[in-house]
Amino acid sequence: MRGVVARLCILAVSVLVSTAFLGVPPAYAAKPINIGVIAFQSPPPGQSIFDAARLAVEQINAKGGINGRPVKLFEYDDHGKSADAVEAFQRAVYSDHVVAVVGVWISEVALALEPWAARLHVPFIITGGASTKISSLIHDNYDAYKYNFQLTLNSDQMARSIADFLKEDVVDKLGYKRAFIASENFDWTKSLDEGYLKNLPKAGITVVGHLRFAPDTNDFTPVFSRIEKAHPDIVVTGWAHVGVKPTVQWHEQQVPVLLAGVNAQAATSAFWAATNGATEGVISQSEASDAPITPKTIPFVKAFEQKFGISPAYCGYNTYDALYMLKGAIEAAHSTRSDALVEALEKASYTGVQGRIRFQGKKSPFTHSIKYGAGFVTGIQAQWQKGKLVTVWPDRAATGTLVVPDFVKNKKSAQ
């Protein structure tokens, strides 16, 4: 009997040593929970989605996983193509047996995946696509499309956030009241521009021009020439796929207008090197920043920067929150069944790195999009100042104040 006990003890020790050597806690003999992440990896927003998901999973597993089960992440690069994303979604469900999918920062790709989430009954949390069509599809086809969630400010909400910032920090403090809207021609900016046209006048701003340019535009000289002829004080942007070229040319040509709005690539520290410093003075909306938005925000940014060497892009914040919301939903439901997760996500009230997150209900025109406003997520405005991103709005999270670039300072508002 003693010999049997001794052999069992030796076996237990060897298992502990083996699992420790592999970096896997012994408790993780349990079956893993598989979660898929899909995005276009090479641009900064896509890379941030993958990196934020990796960081969240690493942290979750280090603290015991979810209900004692480790999370296993399956990554798929959609190359910015809907067909590749659909193939990845199918592979994630049929081959890798994921219980949920997160990611995607291109609205057209997200819209292509929504029917598949509905068809396969797999929760899909979109962490970058901002088109209002994403949530309107859910609203119009709730019973089928309820598996889709939009954990990012949609483009209408972005426009409200930017208008709120401009009213408080630009119109009231600088007296700048004339704006020209310039957006890349993608689906997400259609509703963004509609939001600008609706919300900017409410902020006391006159819209003096509006153009949409092709994403493959290389020379922005004609664009800025047309803008200057309208004598605006501000160019309000809708840029995500582009960003480097128009930003560099705005700086090189010393276009004497403030550059604000959405310049998604400018919201990560990698943009300074990408533009060789030409982003100095640029203001961009983001979901969060290295600012005291919630007690979780700064620790996340520091951990991200330490691990990956750059700050997260806007959808990195969303993706990180998405993984933790899935964790909470699984724990609340005591299940990974799709319908149970949908119900748990609909009931969730989670304070993440970007604010308190609640999804809107089926009666809202933005069904399963997050709530915007005081007490929820508002987004932030950050400006490049001397090589650093400084949060300038809202006041409760600000780490500095707005600075007008030298070549804009003498700009007189053309009333």
Image (cartoon, helix red, strand yellow):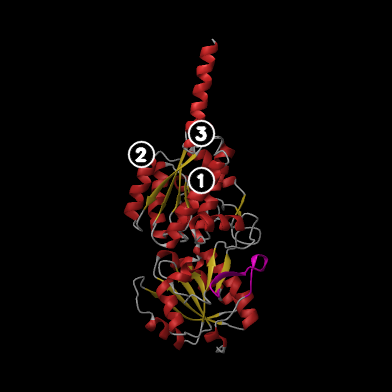
- Mark 2–mark 3 contact, CB under 8 Å? no
Could you tell me which quadrant the C terminus lies in? bottom right
Q: Pointer 2: what residue?
A: 95
> Would you call the spot at circle 1 few (<14 residues within 10 Å), some (14-19), or many (20 or more)?
many
Report the front residue among 238 and 380. Answer: 380
- Mark 2–mark 1 contact, CB under 8 Å? no
Visible residue check, residue 149: no
Q: Which label's residue is closer to the chain start, 1 or 3?
A: 3
Q: Which label's residue is closer to the chain start, 2 or 3?
A: 3
Report which quarter residue 347 is drawn in.
top right
Q: Pointer 3: what residue?
A: 28
Magenta span includes 392: yes
The residue at the point 67 percent across, 65 percent down is 396
> Would you call the spot at circle 3 few (<14 residues within 10 Å), some (14-19), or many (20 or more)?
some
Residue 160 against residue 148 in the figure, above or below: below
Magenta span includes 180: no
Left or right position of 64 against 128: right
Quote the CA–CA distance across marks 2 and 1.
20 Å
Left or right position of 364 against 238: right
Report the front residue among 327 and 193. Answer: 327
Q: Pointer 1: what residue?
A: 57
**What residue range appears in magenta?**
385-401
Q: Secondary structure at mark 3?
A: helix
Residue 40 against residue 13 in the figure, above or below: below
Q: Position of residue 155 (x, y in %)?
A: 50, 64
Q: Which label's residue is closer to the chain start, 2 or 1?
A: 1
**Residue type marked 2:** Ser
